[in-house]
Image (cartoon, rainbow, N blue to C red):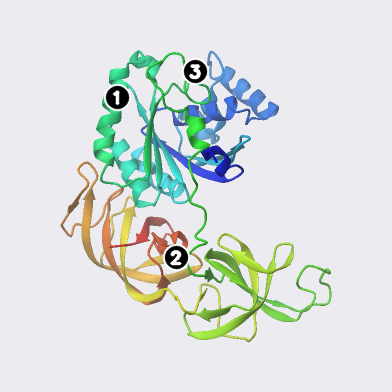
Amino acid sequence: MGAPERIQGSLLRFVTAGSVDDGKSTLIGRLLHDSKGLFADQLSAIEAASRRRGFGGLDLSLITDGLLSEREQGITIDVAYRYFATPLRKFIIGDSPGHLQYTRNMVTAASTADLAVLLVDARTGIVSQTRRHAYLAHWLGVAHLVLAVNKMDLAGWSQARFEAIRDEFARFAETLGFADAQAIPLCALSGDNVVERSAAAPWYHGPTLLAHLETVPAAGPAAQGPFRMAVQRVVRIAGGNAQAGSGFEHAPFRGYQGTVAGGVVAAGDAVLAVASGQPATVRRLIGPSGEIGFAAAGDAVTIELDRDIDLSRGDLLAAPGQPPARLRTLEVDLCWFDAAPLDPSRPYLLKQGSATVRARLERIVHRIDIERLERVAGDEPFAMNDVGRVRLALQQPLAVDDYRSNRSLGALILIDEVTHRTVAAGTIAHG
């Protein structure tokens, strides 16, 4: 069975990243336009906006640059998400900003991605932001990478130039451990090698960008690991007006609502309230459309247990034989977002899923030199866009898995408890 058949109908989440003006928004616009992923009214709106800007044709970058400030400046500021499908699969695209000060937005977009499309301008080649985005994609567990060497028309479709960029990046990325890294020469503006193969590069025998995206395996939710579900809401169903078949007609009962973060749970399974250590058995599972037999990672569900136990928002239900660790200190790989540096003298709010605890810096373990991929010792507080490992002391224990085994329980953000700004994103360190 060929690769396209194996992934038919599956969903691939991918993020575009790169430096300013490398053509990320234009590339996404070209993908959507050439794969017939735009509605007629969207095309009409983009045509009108292109004329207002004095663009000679269709400015495809406007498809994702939706904020007024972005259209005025001609840059991407926020993360723009777009959805499209081909006969082989469905896609969610995250178009992340290229400016250094918007690194936090790239981290947001990459945190749920299966693949990163990293653009470079064929004229300038690999730059610092290329290496930074590649490292961040690796750090966030993105398994697959495409090096899209864009604006090849401005480099005369030079095979030597493409191969020099490809080989330089391969040497850098070799130690990062991506499952695969495919280099593709293209021109997003004209569509060469985006959806249709280009006659301008007869020396290139690899896939077009879309053909490659259609065959890359998606990671999918962590269905193979042990069961995990953070409680988002505790509900008391009183009954009386429940619709037949909804699963609630046998009320009253207490239900624990959340999204399964790992594994599978079924009626009759034993579960454990991790914070209190109390065991229980699943009596019923209720999905959006009524009672169900089981729920897997990614499913939203209401769980009724065979007994009332001490559970509230932020608590965790888990498989009793494989509970997560409950820790008061964490080693965290951190990317600092805020203009104000990390302050060792003050606490921050650490938010993981629906759980929130106070945390304070215990020590800085190391920083990462993005250019050399080397660990750098030192206790200088993290500044904006610094990446490295820190040790945090928590006010109360937190149930965690390492990020590599469970993205939901292994990911966190730090919040300034005075301003409520998100100042950093982190992952529970693995090794």
For the point 44% across and 51% down, which residue is it? 111
Question: Where is mark 3, residue-wise?
Answer: 190
Q: Nearer the viewer, residue 42 or 131?
A: 131
Q: In the rendered view, would you say 9 is above or below 417?
A: above
Distance, label 3 to label 1, CA atoms, is: 21 Å
The picture quadrant where one finds residue 36 is top right
For the point 25% across and 39% down, which residue is it? 172
Q: How many marks?
A: 3
**Which mark identifies residue 163?**
1
Q: Pointer 2: residues within 10 angstroms few (<14), some, or many (20+)?
A: many
Q: Identity of the amino acid at label 3?
A: Ser
Quarter that holds the C terminus: bottom left
Judge left or right: residue 364 versus residue 191.
left
**Upstream in the sequence, badge 3 or badge 2?**
3
| Tag 1 and tag 2, C-beta contact below 8 Å | no
Question: Where is mark 2, residue-wise?
Answer: 409
Indicate the position of residue 246 as horizontal and vertical percent values: 78, 68
